[in-house]
Structures are given as C-alpha cells and as structure tokens.
Image: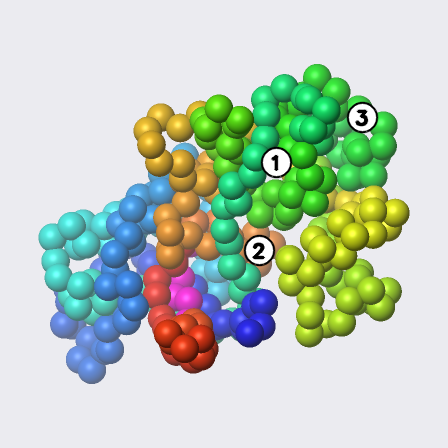
Amino acid sequence: MPTYIIFLIILLFAPHLSAYSLAGNRSGTSPINDDLGYRGLANALEKSCRYYENAAEQTFELCGQRLSGHELNRSYRQIISRLQGQPGQDIGLFIAENFTACRPTSLLVTGYYSPVLSGTLTPTETYRFPIYGLPAPGDLRKMSRAVINSASPLKGHEIAYLSDPMDLFFLHVQGSGIIQLPDGRRHLVSYAASNGRPYTSIGKILIQEGRLQRQEVSMATIHRYLTDHPGQRTRILNKNERFIFFRLSAPQSGEIIPTGSLGYPLTPGRSVAMDGGHYPPAILGILTGRLPHFAEDGEVSWQPFSRLVT
C-alpha cells in the first residue's frame, strides 16, 4: 500500500452574498455528495467562521475572485444554519446551487495522526531530548535545526522532554502530539510556530543516498534505519532545517484534541492542512479520491470517496 495517494480537491467559495438563491432555483443541479453524511461539518465550519471573524477586513483571493473575511464568515454561517435545521440531501443541493466551484486541482495528500509519546516535564537521564516552546520574537526563531540542536540556544524554553530523538523529530513532522507522563497524566503539545526554514523530507534524502529503496520508505523504516545507524542520524535529521516550536496544555476534560495551525481544535475527517502559498486558510473544499478498505482476510481494496473539508 502506498504511503500517500493523489487526490483531487475542488475549492469552494461563496459568490457575492446577494447572489444567494433558494434551493431548487437551478434545475438539474446535482447535490454535493459527502461520504460522512455531513457529520462533523458544522463543527469544522464553526472554526473557519471564528477565523474569518477575526480577519473580517482581510481580503482572500481564490480562482480570480477576491472575498473578505466578513463575506466568507457570513457565507459559511448559511451552511451551518442549514446543517442545524435541514436534512443532509438539502445541504448538498444548497451548496451546489449557491457556491462556485474552482477548477479541480491535483495535489498530494498525506495522513495525519497524533502520536502518544512517553515523556516528562523535567529532564532525567532517560528523558533528555527537549521539546521547545516559542521563544520571544527575534533571531532565536530563525535558527536552523542544526544550530538549535548543537548550540542549545533555546535553553530555558523547554516545555517537556522525550527519551527518543526520532520520536521528537516525527513530533515535529506531525506538528502535535500527546505526552504521557510516568504517573499516567497526559498533556497535549500543539504547534505554536516554525523557524520559517524550508522543509526537507529525510525519506527523500535516504533514497538519494541509497540508504533505503523508494518502495520501502515509511515512517517505520526511517525510524529503524536511523536508530540502527546513530552515527548518521544527526547529519540526516539536520538536512531538514525546519524546526517546530510547541505549546503545552493540560486537557480540560478527558479528551485531548490536537490543535491546528490556526489555533483551533481539529475536526476528525474534516480538517485539512493546505499550502498557504496556494490556498487561503480555513477555506471550504471538496476532497475526492480513494480510501483503503481492509477485509477480514487482510485484502485491501480502494474505494472512492468525496467529502467537504476545511
């Protein structure tokens, strides 16, 4: 099974608010299909609306149109209102009739998970690899991974510690995780910011250097290779200059939900991270592609899906 799949995404945005029409005005319009039955969509859109409320006067450009945060917020609240009072089929038809679809864009999609890692809040002989919080604005935020790891310029900004440098690196890749303390308590470490340096895939580096074959590269094989070859680990990890700073929080209830780059909790099955250089943040889209389904005998089949994401 491949480690990633190419999907199509059709980004949607509302036309001018005065262009809203009642459902049924466009004869022959097919409703937007959603394989989750629109479950969780209102929750995800609510977070988009909060973001646009705070950026009401900001202008966002997509597919040749310029829309304000105020317009996007008001548009998405129309969908939320429908979700709270109408059956799912009506929602799909309402969106198809009242929102404009951009031309589909092919893009690379990878899965997201939130690792649970053993750690401590203070250093020990075992737990000695620090997770750093966000330093004050200035040069510290711009240093490369190599400089941060070699010179320890962020001393005093540690928020937690892990026992495995590879677990720490993959926490940087995922952007958030759960730290389980020795006494069983759990804390969430969430993305706060990056150092602004470019991201480089170390899997790609290992392929280029002939350390791993393309078809065998996965998080598990990368972890195993660099654990088995500690003399190469620092050099290869430092090829990825991007460094992530985190914030630490204790759960207010029994559930810990990772936080996205906009500062809001992620919605399972709905939240996506897109390249901000190409797509506005918190925009509504249709993600289509194939998902793996596993039979009891271990056979994998790939089935199409289509869902609204933001």
75 relative to 12, above or below: above
Q: Which residue is mark 3?
A: 152
What residue is drawn where x is 58% and y is 67%?
Answer: 3
Callout 3: helix, strand or loop? loop
Residue 40 in the magenta stretch? The answer is: no
Q: Identify which amino acid the numbered label 1 is placed on.
A: Ala
Question: Which mark is drawn over residue 275?
Answer: 2
User: Which circle, 2 or 3, is nearer the viewer?
Assistant: 3
Q: Earlier in the sequence, mark 2 or mark 3?
A: 3
Kind of residue at badge 3: Ser
Magenta highlight on residue 286: yes
Quarter of the C terminus within the rendering: bottom left
Residue 120 shows in this picture: yes
Magenta stretch: give its range: 283-289
Q: Position of residue 68 (x, y in %)?
A: 41, 47
Residue tagged 1:
193
Looking at the image, the residue that sits furthest to the top is 156
Instruction: Compare residues 101 and 80 and report the one nearer the observer.
Output: 80
